[in-house]
Image: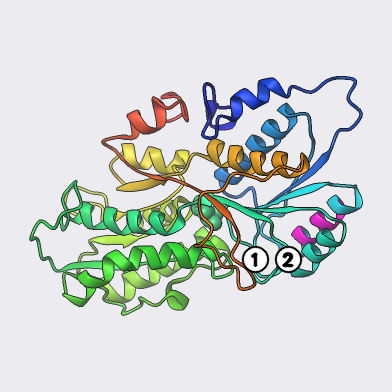
């Protein structure tokens, strides 16, 4: 395993590495504070890395950690958070499943003066979310849309129009409707794609472009694969599909499998341009093999570092560092946030972005 699940060596994104050394736990310290870390699922490798990174960094600062994964089941996540509060957790880090379903349990946290950090996904409809640690999710969507157009040759490497007008046949996928990020990714991508749809450079034969229709509940890869198969059989039989907007690698990889069974990937039928997100190992292998066009790299070590500095500051009575206090209105309040930057990865730059940064070793990528 590479450093994907290890500490970041050298200065971290917030200079936290120094703090780690400075605040190394004293074995005799009996004021150890318990932090509950609720993660959504282990079905996607990124959440496992997130859970491990947050835990390791909190422990390095001398905190005890209760890490739980809820396997995409909302009642399980609520029960896990309740158990953390029962066990005396003094702060919570929550990667939510359904961003609208935690209002009551977070009210309980607030009644116990337990601050809550929303991790990666915004928790909606609750006044009891103290801070939000995430990536610039709108930018992720823009990067996905841009990358699809670059793969098709409509935009050049610098993102400038090439004059290529297609038309190109594409189909669009979105993430889970209960995950706030899914809408933000979609809107970011559509902000780039819509002008080309309007101009007829991109054509969606199914006509399915609105979020509700193209969403994939629970980010379920099988659901996306089934939809891809139906779209191919119904709208692209005998006509080539040129591109697929896939919002995450856990959807892109099963979509590629369906494309393969429909004859794509051979010399006479090259792969459509397929996007992704997370730089999952399976997806990076697909990039290297020339199957998936791109993914979006979000360094989960940095995200853990941001969330951990928020927790540590709050427990010490300090104000956490934020860099965005306007973008994320959760329906009740604008949650002060720290947004990290993501990066587009293709076959051309994966070595530099993923291997030279120490996120993966070359061996892990085969
Ligand atoms: C995350 C993505 C992830 C998706 C599915 C989103 O909320 O931001 O990184 O691919 O959930 O797990």
- Residue 207 visible to the viewer: yes
Q: CA distance from mark 1 to mark 2?
A: 8 Å
Q: Is residue 79 left or right of 214 when viewed as pictured?
A: right
Location of residue 4 with respect to 195 vertically, above or below:
above
Identify residue for label 1: 98
Q: Is residue 158 left or right of 181 when viewed as pictured?
A: left
Q: Where's residue 174, x and y in %? A: 44, 66
Disc 1: CA contacts within 10 A as few (<14), some (14-19) or many (>=20): many
In the image, what residue occupies the spot 69% across and 21% down? 22
Magenta stretch, residue numbers: 77-83
Q: Where's residue 52, x and y in %? A: 66, 36
In the image, what residue occupies the spot 40% across and 32% down? 354
Disc 2: CA contacts within 10 A as few (<14), some (14-19) or many (>=20): many
Q: Is residue 223 magenta?
A: no
In the image, what residue occupies the spot 41% across and 44% down? 283
In the image, what residue occupies the spot 73% across and 66% down? 102
Q: Is residue 353 left or right of 161 when viewed as pictured?
A: right
Identify residue for label 2: 102
Q: Residue furthest bottom?
A: 207
């Amino acid at each position: 395993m590479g450093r994907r699940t290890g500490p970041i060596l050298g200065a971290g994104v917030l200079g936290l590495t120094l703090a780690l050394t400075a605040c190394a736990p004293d074995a005799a310290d009996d004021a150890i504070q318990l932090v509950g870390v609720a993660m959504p699922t282990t079905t996607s490798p990124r959440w496992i890395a997130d859970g491990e990174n947050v835990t390791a960094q909190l422990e390095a600062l001398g905190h005890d950690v209760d890490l739980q994964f809820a396997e995409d089941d909302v009642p399980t996540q609520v029960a896990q958070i309740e158990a953390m509060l029962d066990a005396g957790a003094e702060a919570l880090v929550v990667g939510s499943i359904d961003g609208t379903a935690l209002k009551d349990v977070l009210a309980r946290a607030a009644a116990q003066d337990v601050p809550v950090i929303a991790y990666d996904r915004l928790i909606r409809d609750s006044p009891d979310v103290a801070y939000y640690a995430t990536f610039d999710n709108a930018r992720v969507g823009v990067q996905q849309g841009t990358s699809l157009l670059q793969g098709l040759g409509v935009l050049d490497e610098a993102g400038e129009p090439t004059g290529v007008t297609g038309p190109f046949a594409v189909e669009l996928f979105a993430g889970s409707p209960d995950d706030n990020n899914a809408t933000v990714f979609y809107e970011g991508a559509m902000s780039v794609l819509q002008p080309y749809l309007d101009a007829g450079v991109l054509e969606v034969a199914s006509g399915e472009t609105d979020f509700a229709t193209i969403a994939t509940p629970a980010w379920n890869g099988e659901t996306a694969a089934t939809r891809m198969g139906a779209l191919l059989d119904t709208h692209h039989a005998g006509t080539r599909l040129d591109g697929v907007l896939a919002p995450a690698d856990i959807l892109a990889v099963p979509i590629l499998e369906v494309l393969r069974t429909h004859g794509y990937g051979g010399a006479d039928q090259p792969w459509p341009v397929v996007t992704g997100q997370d730089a999952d190992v399976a997806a990076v292998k697909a990039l290297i093999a020339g199957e998936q066009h791109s993914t979006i790299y979000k360094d989960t070590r940095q995200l853990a570092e941001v969330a951990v500095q928020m927790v540590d500051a709050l427990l010490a009575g300090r104000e956490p560092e934020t860099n965005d206090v306007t973008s994320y209105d959760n329906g009740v309040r604008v949650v002060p946030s720290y947004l990290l930057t993501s990066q587009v990865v293709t076959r051309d730059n994966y070595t530099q972005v993923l291997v030279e940064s120490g996120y993966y070793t070359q061996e892990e990528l085969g």
